[in-house]
Image (tube, rainbow, N blue to C red):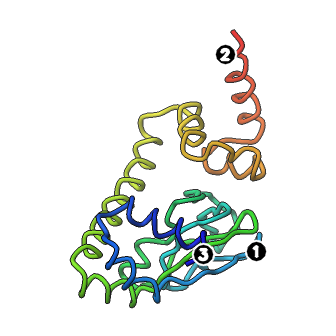
Amino acid sequence: MTDKNDVVFQHLQTFAPLNDKDIIDSQPFWKARKINKGDYFNMQSMVCKDLGLVVKGIFRIYYRNPETNEEKNIFFFSENQFVVSFRSFISQTACWYFIEAMEDSEIFFISHKDLNDLYDTHPNWAKFGRILAESFFSIAQTRTEEFIFFSHEQRYLRLLDEHPHIIERIPAYHISSYLGITNPSLSRMRKRIEKKKIE
């Protein structure tokens, strides 16, 4: 395996209780893919057939209103996170979202069929599937609760905790879209936060 492969499989073993045999048996199914900035991991109205693990880069998952073409950012995925439209992936039905690379990116991915074959033949990979489902349920519920219980500033700080360098990596208007505020509001909020740090 290359060093990059080592990193991927180490992350998988950190994420779920996979032993060396589980990893070795899964190796033929994981494939490397480079996705250029502006290209897509998955498209709206298409079935999400792969689960990706981000090795390098950052992705946004967004909805585009077909009537107005207005875009709304829903999630970001960066290094050591799984990138997928999870509902579409598990149900193998059409995805509601686009998943776009915001930088030149690299992922390792496995198909829905191959992953489910591992679930059927390896108990530890079945545990991986359960942990993956719990993880994405938690992500989705947390995102909903953030809009109910947290201020824009709190949501912004939580985003920075999860993706520490996101501000330097993608245009600010994508952050504004994710937070549900305007660009000027984001700029004022960032100045307030910087001022608090100084005081």
**In the picture shown, does residue 198 fall above or below 130?**
above
Mark closer to the chain start, 3 or 1:
3
Of the two numbered discs 1 and 2 in the rendering, the one whose residue sits closer to the viewer: 1
Identify the amino acid type marked 1.
Answer: Asn
Residue name at image x 66 percent, y 50 percent: 177
On residue 50, the disc is: none
Q: Residue furthest top?
A: 199
SS class, disc 2: helix
In which quadrant is the N terminus drawn? bottom right
Give the residue number, with chain letter if any, for mark 2: 196
Identify the amino acid type marked 3.
Answer: Thr
Mark closer to the chain start, 2 or 3:
3
Residue name at image x 78 percent, y 51 percent: 171
SS class, disc 3: loop
**In the picture shown, does residue 102 fall above or below 121?**
above
Q: Where is residue 49 in the image (x, y as percent from the top left)?
A: 48, 85
| Disc 2/disc 3 C-alpha distance (Å) | 45 Å
**In the picture shown, does residue 14 fall above or below 40?**
above
Residue name at image x 31 percent, y 69 percent: 18
Q: Where is residue 52 in the image (x, y as percent from the top left)?
A: 52, 74
Q: Nearer the viewer, residue 52 or 59?
A: 52
- Evaluate if marks 3 and 1 touch, with contact meaning CB atoms under 8 Å apart: no
Instruction: Examine the image and state in which quarter residue 27 appears.
Output: bottom left
| Disc 1/disc 2 C-alpha distance (Å) | 38 Å
Give the residue number, with chain letter if any, for mark 3: 2
Mark closer to the chain start, 1 or 2:
1
Q: Where is residue 194 in the image (x, y as percent from the top left)?
A: 72, 22
In which quadrant is the C terminus drawn? top right
Give the residue number, with chain letter if any, for mark 1: 36
Q: Which of 109 and 47 is in front in this view?
A: 109
